[in-house]
Amino acid sequence: MPDATKRRKAVLDRSPEERERRGHSSEDVQAALLDVIERGSREEKVFTDVAFPELDLDYADIEGANKHPVVFRNCAFEGVRAEHADVKVPVSFEGCTVDGLDLEGARFEYDATFAGTTFTDEVATFEARFDRDADFTGATFSAPVIADETRFEDDASFADATFESTASFRGAEFHGKSNALEDHASFAGARFEAEATFLQSSFEFSTFAGARFAGPARFQEVRFDGDADFSEVAFEREADFDEVDFGQDATFEGSEFRGLAVFRGAEFEGGARSLQDDARFVGVAFRDDADFRDTHFRDANFDDARFDGTAVFEEAWFDADVDFRRVEFAREADFDEARFAGDADFSESEFRAPAVFRGAEFEGDANHLEDNATFADVWFADDADFDNAKFTSANFLRTRFGGVVDFFGATFDDRIDFLAEAIDDDTYVDFTDAKIKSGVVEQPADEWVRYDFTLASLGDVTLDAGHDRGHRKLLDYFRFCKTEFSEFDGYEFDFSAYTEYLDRNDWRLHTFDENAAEYEYAAAMTPETVETTYLKAKNAASAGGYVKAAGEFRIKRQQYARRKHVAIVRDASADVGSRFRNLSRAAENYFLDVSCGHGMRLTRIMVVFFVAPLFPALLYAFGGSPFLTDAGQLDSLSQLATPEGQSIAYKNLHFSYITYLTIGYGGIGPTGALARLLAGLEVYLSVILGGLFLYALVKRSEL
């Protein structure tokens, strides 16, 4: 080192008081420092416990004859200004105290280290550029930090740093290549005591693991091109990740959001690694509202998370599998119109307030190993709304419900496994207008649940009881009203499985064991509605080859059709013509019911056909002169005890049958006026009943 440089080195080593006695100004100290940086050896560029005045290095080119680092250990600076300076040597501030740092527009071409340094006044690095590593590990910032649009081209570390005032990294860029040993941007363990702003910043691989944000944390429109690690982070106030783009894997595992958590419009694109979650929120505690509205995930894991406030996933997209296992939702969970393209697993979770899945789509592929929507062992303490939700396959086994369960208009394209357990005694599952291709709906061992299938479409759906004796009352808990049973080709509802129950209950399909709770049904059980219900059931049973069920449902349909006609007859506001037509239809319906069971009671029509002539025979034998025939008449029943009386009775009976069967031989003829009329009516009745007999045969063959 030249003598002049040695003298300047000596100036730097003196205390401020000694410099003042010797007449060294701040400009002299600054010139001495620059001279040592330019010409000093490795050892001479190390400064320990030196006190520096405020340095003004604006627009300076700071370089040396060698690239030995300039090291300040435990030094004190009244301030450093280096706006638009170009620092071409490595610099290191280790455990120093700097009253203020202004690096606006500065460039550091080599490593810049500020580890353990305390900044007592504002730090400004606006538009500064660090070409190599920038290390602020363990630094303390007592005043605001303004690092807007700062570029960190290689590793940047603020690990364990403390920001006692506001910290702003708006538009900052953290570039560099990730490696296995460290992240190129690290705020691990950092403490932000006031607002921290990273608006529109960009990161490659980064970590905030173990950081603490005592003030608002603002990450709006930030882009993470590499992995982002926010595990075990404490967000004590609002955390805003609006429209953040996570280009690789992102983890918030074990973090706590004590204020509002906002991820509206965020994108979790995920990396190529199939064994790691693209978005990991395992064990996260959301103490306030959490807003994931319009967020886009590839796959995500929220296992063991807790939402103490409202959880909003409205219109969120999950392109791959998502896990919400063992999650606690203390307030409303809103998944309105969320889209699950992969498997969604909510098993063992608790919804303590209303759960809303209106219009949600669970589109995962159906397979034999896993359901694409799993709500097994879930507890819904309040209303569960799946109105118009779409499922491929769904698992609701051992799911507990405490409020209204709404599947109105829901569709199950593959199958459903449903075993609901009631929390309260009025639990009611509404499948109105739902479409279920196949599956099992099972009642638990105790506390049975009521189901409403009004206007629903059921395919190969099995209704089961929790124990064998439960089958005796199984259908009392299912309401069928205008239900379609044959909409899915190859998937028919099996009525034969419930023959014993239906036969015991006179084939009443529409009855419903309503409890004390009040519900508004989509269709009232009017005679017309019930008629339509049995018509649909009859058509489905007939198509499926369930002969017995089809016939019985046909009879029930006709019985309620008669009630419909009678209701119109009793309606004083209806016109006379309509009332007369419905009266005739009701009479015809009643006759068909009594005579042949609307064609379904073959034995009945056979009995009627063969017994019918007995009644005219009694009139012929005991009716007096108006019913007199050539066979004669009896004056009293006592005459039947005599051979003559028995002969007269037999001849009248014979006359009635040969007339009825239209094979009269002419040996006996009607004499009385009413006898002649009755004989003609017998022939007419024979034709009618014979036709009904053939009608019953045909109808039974059609089923």
Image (cartoon, rainbow, N blue to C red):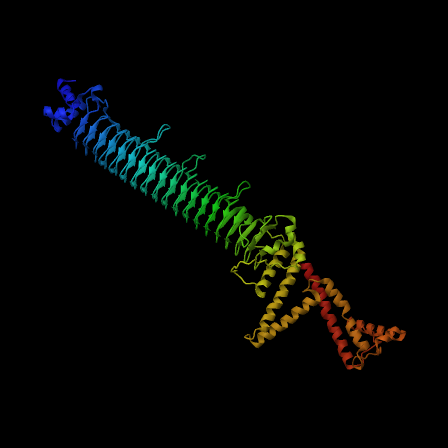
Q: Residue 653 sits in which quadrant?
A: bottom right
Question: Hey, which residue is sitting farthest left in the picture?
Answer: 23
| Vertical arrangement, residue 10 with respect to residue 114, above or below | above
Q: Specify whether 117 is left or right of 434.
A: left
The image shows a total of numbered marks equal to 0
Left of 20 or right of it: where is 398? right
Residue at far right of view: 643
Residue 683 percent coordinates (x, y): 75, 73
Foreground: 606 or 311? 311
Viewport quadrant of the N terminus: top left
Using residue 436 as the reference point, say whether residue 126 is left or right of it.
Answer: left
Q: Residue 213: x percent and y percent? A: 33, 39
Q: Nearer the viewer, residue 210 or 615?
A: 210
Residue 652 or 346: which is nearer the viewer? 346
Report whether 186 appears left or right of 490.
Answer: left
Question: Where is residue 34, by image quadrant?
Answer: top left
Q: Is residue 629 visible?
A: yes
* Place of residue 282 in the rendered image (x, y in percent of width and height, measured from the top left): 43, 38
Q: Quadrant for the C terminus, please.
A: bottom right
- The image shows residue 543, relative to residue 101, as above or below, that is below
Q: Is residue 545 visible?
A: no
Residue 652 % position (x, y): 82, 74
User: At 61% across and 65% down in the image, what residue appears?
Assistant: 560
Q: Foreground residue, 630 or 192? A: 192
In the rendered view, would you say 376 is above or below 586?
A: above
